[in-house]
Amino acid sequence: MEKFAVAKASSIDLAVEKALQELGVSRDRVEVEVLAKGGLFQKAEVKVTVIETAASLAEDFVNGILEKMGLVSRATAVETDGTVTVTVSGEDSGTAIGYRGEALDAIQFLARTYLNQEKQSSAKVVIDCENYREKRRETLTALALRLAEKAHRTCRKVVLEPMNPFERRIIHSALLDSEIAETHSEGEDAQRHVVIVPKGVEIKEDRRPRNGRREGGRRDRNDRRGGKFDGKKDFRASRDDDRRREDRRERRPRTEEEEVPDGREYRGYYTDSFTKQEAPKSGPPKFKSFGGTKKF
């Protein structure tokens, strides 16, 4: 859809500036058509039409998404050799990136789909924010080299987590000329992942996950050190632990039965049986005399 604006002013330049403000674009993105040059009693009139390029369409589309997300970040687009590169910058650009670039990948997918529908072209769209793509490339390249060494050392395949096509391509490129490992992709759709296979060694079979859990899940409580479970070894260990706990238990030495002043007997605990006491004698109470007579 053609986007244009018609403006009048005392001069052609002022009319063009007025139209650019109305359209919200820069001078290099428009075509100017002079409808009237103006004169002493007539104003100049121009028609300013926005040139719809792949870069301008992608830029407007991404800025619209950022506004819908409530972000102040803005996008600028440049087209080079059939590739549209959109750069997002702003204070809240981290939100535009998302967890591991998921939000950035989603915006890139939408922008590519929109551009292909509007321009009927298969132009490549790359959206970057705060140089995230380059940093992610360096991280994945280092990860691929480290896991290739692990696969060759352990003689086992290494299965990576699901990745998008951009990240899988980085892993494949990093190990393309490797002499110790090779890569291929498995799975479908969102579960598609990269598998690193060692070269020049006999590949060992994958270990069976315990209790149906995948590798990397919670360990068995009987396998605290992460080694192979051995029922006999675990039984001996638990028996030794019981013995050590029993030895540490404080024991009170046995003593002969003793009596306490209140007449109870001590047999490791106080009993409720009392010794027989003499019955008090009948009669009035007696008081000690200190040289005088006690009066009541």
Image (cartoon, rainbow, N blue to C red):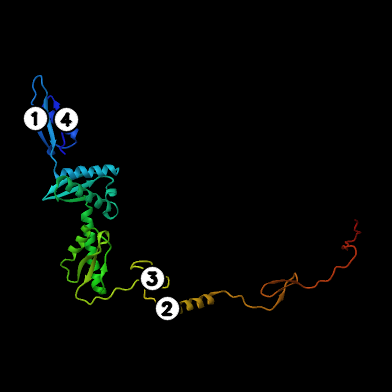
Q: Residue furthest top?
A: 41
Instruction: Tell me the kind of residue under disc 4.
Output: Lys
Look at 89% across and 66% down and name the residue there. 282
Q: Quadrant of the N terminus?
A: top left
**Secondary structure found at label 3:** helix
Q: Earlier in the sequence, mark 3 or mark 4?
A: 4
| Residue assigned mark 2 | 231
Judge from the rendering whether residue 226 lies leftward or rightward of residue 85; answer left or right: right
Could you say which quadrant of the image residue 68 lies in?
Answer: top left
Q: Nearer the viewer, residue 121 or 277?
A: 121
| Residue assigned mark 1 | 34
Judge from the rendering whether residue 217 lies leftward or rightward of residue 60; answer left or right: right
| Residue assigned mark 3 | 211
Q: Earlier in the sequence, mark 1 or mark 3?
A: 1
Q: Relative to residue 104, is residue 288 depicted above or below?
A: below
Determine the CA span between mark 1 and mark 4.
14 Å
Residue 124's label in the rendered image is: none
Residue 86 at x, y = what percent?
19, 47
- For label 1, the crowd category at 10 Å Cα-Cα, with few meaning under 14, some 14 to 19 and many 20 or more, is some
Determine the CA span between mark 3 and mark 4.
72 Å
Q: Earlier in the sequence, mark 1 or mark 2?
A: 1
Q: Earlier in the sequence, mark 4 or mark 2?
A: 4
Q: Nearer the viewer, residue 161 or 11?
A: 161
Determine the CA span between mark 1 and mark 2.
91 Å
Instruction: Tell me the kind of residue under disc 2.
Output: Gly
Determine the CA span between mark 1 and mark 3.
79 Å
Q: Earlier in the sequence, mark 1 or mark 4?
A: 4
Residue 188 at x, y = what percent?
25, 62
| Residue assigned mark 4 | 18
Instruction: Tell me the kind of residue under disc 1.
Output: Val
Residue 274 at x, y = what percent?
76, 71
